């Protein structure tokens, strides 16, 4: 089943959606600790004031109406950018999250027979699909606003996300180390040039 998700720029409800998906995802605490929470408290007002852009992925209306178990699902993925526009004409993707619990709910609703390894495979595929849909909208935004480059930093330990970035056409630019992250894990910076 294709086209499960719709992605759009978050407007006046951005803060509500972002906080909901943050609560459902503990990976950022795992990789970044309190540093991420501190950054988020500064970034959300920027989104509200239009200085940063936030995109959200949602279960599409058709699917939500068809399966009652999905009525209560809201946001399933999100990303926040750096401040745009900027002199470098670059969009940096921050706080890129996919709600694993929501994906499992979708799997149980659509395919009740899935269990164990089959469910793990479904979740993996859907996480990639959601990231792909979000990146598609980010690229549209970049082309519309004449931005040249998309950048995203990924923990070197997060092999699944690194593989997704490479599949989405991103290339490793450099390795970074931020001493204030917890644990002090190296990061991989990925870049993708935008043609317009």
Image: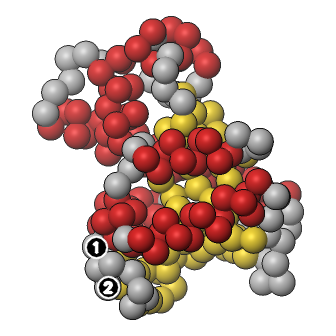
**Rendered image coloring scheme:** secondary structure
> Which of labels 1 and 2 is toward the front?
2
Circle 1 Cα neighbour tier, 10 Å, few/some/many (<14 / 14–19 / ≥20): few
Question: Is 30 placed left or right of 40 in the picture?
Answer: left
Kindly tell me whether residue 139 is visible in this rendering: no
Q: Quadrant of the C terminus?
A: bottom right
Nearest the eye: 85 or 160: 85
- Is residue 101 among the parts visible in the rendering? yes
Q: What residue does disc 2 label?
A: 184
Q: Measuring 38% from the left and 25% from the top, which residue is drawn there?
A: 106
Q: Please rate how many residues cluster around mark 2, counting C-alpha atoms within 10 Å: few if below 14, some from 14 to 19, many from 20.
A: few
Question: Where, by quadrant of the figure, is residue 42 drawn?
Answer: bottom right
Q: Residue 46 placed where, x, y %? A: 74, 63
Q: CA distance from mark 1 to mark 2?
A: 11 Å
**x, y percentage for residue 151?**
60, 74
Q: Are marks 1 and 2 in contact (CB under 8 Å)?
A: no
Residue 157 badge: 1
Q: Is residue 113 above or below residue 42?
A: above
């Amino acid at each position: 089943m294709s086209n499960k998700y719709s992605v759009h720029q978050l407007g006046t409800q951005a803060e509500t959606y972002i906080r909901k998906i943050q609560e459902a995802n503990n990976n950022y605490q795992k990789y970044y600790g309190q540093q991420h929470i501190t950054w988020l408290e500064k970034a959300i007002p920027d989104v509200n004031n239009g200085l940063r852009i936030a995109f959200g992925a949602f279960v599409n209306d058709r699917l939500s109406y068809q399966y009652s178990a999905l009525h209560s699902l809201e946001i399933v993925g999100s990303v926040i950018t750096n401040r745009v526009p900027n002199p470098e004409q670059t969009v940096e993707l921050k706080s890129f999250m996919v709600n694993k619990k929501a994906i499992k709910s979708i799997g149980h609703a659509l395919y009740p027979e899935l269990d164990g390894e089959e469910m793990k495979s479904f979740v993996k595929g859907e996480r990639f699909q959601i990231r792909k849909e979000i990146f598609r909208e980010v690229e549209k935004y970049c082309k519309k606003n004449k931005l040249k480059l998309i950048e995203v930093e990924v923990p070197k330990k997060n092999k699944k996300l690194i593989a997704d970035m490479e599949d989405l056409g991103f290339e490793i630019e450099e390795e970074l180390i931020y001493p204030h992250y917890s644990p002090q894990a190296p990061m991989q910076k990925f870049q993708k040039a935008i043609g317009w």
